[in-house]
Structures are given as C-alpha cells and as structure tokens.
Image (cartoon, rainbow, N blue to C red):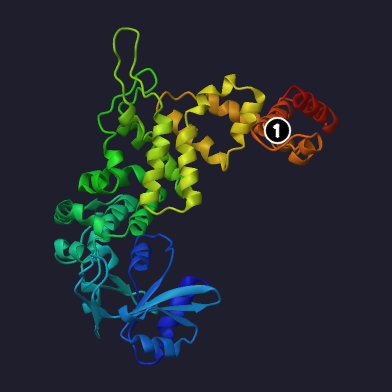
Amino acid sequence: MNPRELAEKICAVLRAQGHQAYLVGGCVRDLELGRQPADYDVCTDARPDRVQELFPHSLAVGAKFGVILVVEEGVQVEVATFRSDIGYSDGRHPDRVVFSNTPEEDVRRRDFTINGLLMDPATGQVLDFANGRADLAAGVVRAIGDPLLRFEEDKLRMLRAVRFAARFGFQIETATMAAAQSLAPQITQVSPERIRDELTKLLTEGAARRGFELLDETGLLAVVLPDITRMKGVQQPPQYHPEGDVWIHTRMLLEGLPPNSSPTLAWGVLLHDVGKPPTFAPATGPGTRIRFDGHAEVGARMAENICRTLRFSNDETEQVEALVANHMRFKDVAQMRPATLKRFVRLARFEEHLELNRLDCLASHGNLDSYNLVRQFLMETPPEKVYPPKLVTGDDLKSLGLVPGPRFKEILLAIEEAQLEGRLPDRDSAMRFARSLSQSS
C-alpha cells in the first residue's frame, strides 16, 4: 500500500460512515501541478475519537488540534478534523481549536491559497474556497485572508512562504511579502529546531539560490543568519574570484547545489566562506591583493556556533565544521606528500568535501585541476593503500618498554607516516623502525 491508496481508503471508510472526507493541502497542490506528492493528508468532519474508532491502528499525535495519524502496513496519513483556530499566543500553535462541520471554515485557518485546495478522491473534483487554483496558474504564493494575521498566528509561515516560492519558482504576492517584511524580526519566536528544518529544506529542495535571495528580500535572512548578510559587498581578489563579492560567490554555489544534497553538504556550501567578512584585509599597494588570512579556521568556529544555535546534532555540527575548516586544503593537493594526501581523503564523508570543492571552483575561477587530481587519486589508489591495517600497535610499543605518553604517540604517528609513504611494506620492517625510534627517544 502506498500513501495515496491509504488516503483514498480512509476517505472511503469515513464517507461510508456518513462523514465528509477530502484530500487536502500540499498533496492536492502537487497533483494540480503535475508533481508526485511526498505525502497525503485528509480532512474530515469526523471528530478525532471517531477517527480512532474507525481506524484502530492510529495514533493521537495532535488530538487536541484534531489530528490523528492513521498507520497501515508501514504507511501513514494524517487525518485532521475540520476546525477553526483560536488565538496564537506563542506565535506558532493555536491556543485552542473549535471543531467545525464545513470544509470552508477549515480552509480559512490554513496558510496559503495554494495549500487550501481539497479534492474528492472518488471523483477528482477540487474544492477551491480560496482561489488557490488561480494562484497556482499565476505562480503566486498568497496568504489566505489577511497576511499579517496569518503570519501573526504562526511566524514559521514566513519561512514557508519563501520556501514554496523558491521550490515552485513562484512570486510572493505583494501584500504577503509586505507582511513578511514587517514581521520578519518576530521569526525568533519560532524554535531554533523549526527554523533549522525550514532552512535545510530550502537548501536541499533544488532552488537554494532563489530561496536565499527571497530570504534576503523579506528581511528574514538578517534575523536568522546575520553572518550570511555580512557577506554582501565584501570584495575578493579578482584573479581568483572574477564573479564578485562573497555574497555573489555564495549564491552561485547555492545555484549549483544539486537537489536532494545531504543537509551537511548544503550547510557546508552556505557557510564555507562565512569567515571571510571578519578576516577581510584590503590590498595595500601595487603587487598586493585582498586577503582573508585564516578565514577557514575562523569560519569553522563561526559555523560551529551557528550549528549549535540551530540545535544541529553533534555529528552534523562536526561535519559542517570540518567542511568549512578543510575547504582551502584542496589548493595544496598537488604538493602534498602521499601520506598527507591519504590522510586528507580519509576525512569523514570525504565525498562531501570533494563536492564542495567542485562547486567552489565552478563558482569562482573555474579551475578543476585539484578536484580532478583528487578524483584520479581515489580511482587509482586501492582502499587498502588509503586505509592500511596498522602494522604496529600501542601494545607492541609497550612490549619494547615504552610508556604511554607524548613520545609514545609521536612514534605511532611516525610509523603510520612511513607506512602511508610506502616505506614500511610489512610488520617486520615496521617493528624494526619502531625499535630504532624507541632507542633514540
């Protein structure tokens, strides 16, 4: 069973019991646009307890808001009772809901006209109480009713307006844009996790550049990611960055970011040059150039702080920080010793480092020599040469009479270095090398 089949079954069961039931929201919008919906939602006049009675395999995920999750064969569909929302004192959730009997009332509390469509799954008839089909045809994201009220109710809707406009290549309707610009400073009422999730979707749905330009236009970017807005007007040396300033460069990377990229790669792309504004040093005379000394290291610390603020997991934070910290190392790969290059490509999820480098080069000087060199190295070098088994362990050093400590660690690193350089082909040669090092310490 797939989500659409389950949604249609739910509607059929509810209707057989005398209830109204429709497909609603994003799934109807996507079907109207000829897209495959990611999931399906149902709305009905049946109260939550009645839905649970009819569907024993269901979960009351938001019963006080009238939302029941029906689960069958590992597939799930949200079923929401028609309702009106009363009060949004936290700027995110209704203080209370009043269940209603008509779909018209339910549509009035939804966010955008394009998400206010209902469909009778039996006939394919679309109910359009908010002129959503006209806005779909015109390519417009428009709030239902008064946009100031819609955004006051739920501040996250401002980010969602940007995301839908970017995803579909739509424009944000004038009054809806003005309302977002007016209320942008209040986006901080939304939890960091919710902001993070919306921004991640914006980065990975295939229209990241357009999305961040709209974030900037609404004023939301300056509130949620002020370090990104500081990239504007920060000039770069034209011999390496003929495209322009750091903001232009970053947007070009976002434009090249493939749809459905991993979240950590997407955030690494966004933040890779976040350390440039605070490290900017202008050219001081003939023969000199603009410099950003230490910007990768500074940027890595800034990226870590941003990820912590947005409540990324430790694993995600470490990967984004690593992408920012290491992105400049590619310029040195042609001069790297074999051991250094092997350690470099052993970075966790190195394919993301490689992709960031490709995007970075294409959005600046266009030279992919370092990228191609690393790719060729990875194709030609057997994994056992990059990740060789240890020839000497700590226990081996202890057997030679060494006590764990700084010198102990130095010897292990020296042995690994020689092994990666190809100077220690087997354990016997490695142990002889270890003995010579231990005797000289």
Quarter of the view holding residue 297? top left
Across and down, in percent, residue 11 comes to: 40, 82
In front of the other: 242 or 415: 415
The reply to whether residue 207 is visible in this rendering is no
Q: In this view, does 240 lie to the left or right of 373?
A: left
In front of the other: 233 or 395: 395
- Asked if 386 appears above or below 183 in the picture, the reply is above
The quadrant of the rendering that contains the N terminus is: bottom right
Residue, x 33% and y 87% (percent of image)?
47
- Asked if 95 appears above or below 181 in the picture, the reply is below
How many marks on residues?
1
The reply to whether residue 189 is visible in this rendering is yes
What amino acid is labelled 1 in the image? Answer: Leu
Tell me if mark 1 has few (under 14), some (14-19) or many (20+) residues whose alpha carbon lies within 10 angstroms of its own: some
The quadrant of the rendering that contains the C terminus is: top right
Quarter of the view holding residue 40? bottom left
Q: Is residue 351 left or right of residue 211?
A: right
Q: In this view, does 390 lie to the left or right of 117?
A: right
Across and down, in percent, residue 195 comes to: 33, 55
- Asked if 195 appears above or below 266 in the picture, the reply is below
- Asked if 122 appears above or below 277 in the picture, the reply is below
Residue, x 36% and y 85% (percent of image)?
48
Residue, x 48% and y 36% (percent of image)?
356
Across and down, in percent, residue 440 comes to: 74, 22
Q: Is residue 123 left or right of residue 381?
A: left
Q: Mark 1 points at which residue?
A: 412
Per the image, label 1 sits on a secondary structure element best described as helix
